[in-house]
Amino acid sequence: IFLFQDFNWFETLGILIAIFLASFISTISEYGSEKAFKRLQDESSKIFVRVVRNGSITKVAVDDIVVSDIVMISSGEVIPADGFLIKGNILIDESRLNGESKEVTKLSGEVVLRGAIVTDGECIIQITNVGEKTVYGKIAKELKEKTIESPLRKRLRDLAKVISRIGYIGSVCVVISY
């Protein structure tokens, strides 16, 4: 408003272009980061496991596992659903579920939970719970309801707060000086 008073068109136009460019670049950056974040989440659901169906072993996407499936798990793989060990002894890392970094030994007949990583051994698991009915699924559902904010979005929001405070202080200084 003060710039229109003096009819300094170059300065006014420069400010408008700067505001437009800053908004445009931040919008593109935010869109790109959200797209990359979503792509990472989508790729994590494309994990395949070996399942015994109709007497033969087939590879099935984790999302396609159903209750009572027989799943074969090897060292380095993630337990795809809650179930109990039918055969085999394994060493698993349950830190995703309980935060403890100590590995736990599971023997035949014991329960294993989705999200645990098999660090040693092989086993066959009878699936009892899938999807949101698993312990991991219940945790994920609670987190989804709280809407997880990406780290980049948090930083951009904090940066926007700082910039707006600087803008408010600058505008007060301009008003006082005029």
Image (cartoon, rainbow, N blue to C red):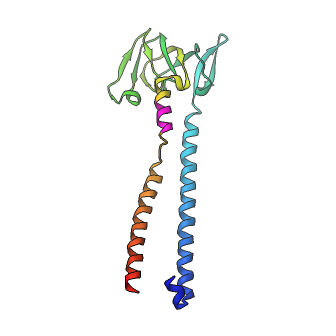
Main secondary structure along the magenta-highlighted residues: helix
Image: 7 above or below 105: below
Q: How many numbered circles does the render carry? A: 0
Q: Quadrant of residue 111?
A: top left
Q: Quadrant of the C terminus?
A: bottom left
Image: 173 above or below 87: below
Q: Quadrant of residue 173?
A: bottom left
Image: 62 above or below 149: above
Residue 22 falls inside the magenta stretch: no
Residue 140 falls inside the magenta stretch: yes
Query: Residue 145: x, y in percent?
Result: 50, 37
Query: Residue 25: x, y in percent?
Result: 55, 65
Residue visible at 54% across and 36% down? 44
In the image as oriented, which residue stretches furthest toward the right? 54
Residue numbers of the magenta segment: 139-145
Residue visible at 58% across and 20% down? 50
Query: Residue 133: x, y in percent?
Result: 52, 22
Query: Residue 26: x, y in percent?
Result: 53, 62
Closer to us: 42 or 54? 42
Residue visible at 54% across and 89% down? 8
In the image as oriented, which residue stretches furthest toward the bottom? 6
Closer to us: 99 or 103? 99
Image: 33 above or below 43: below
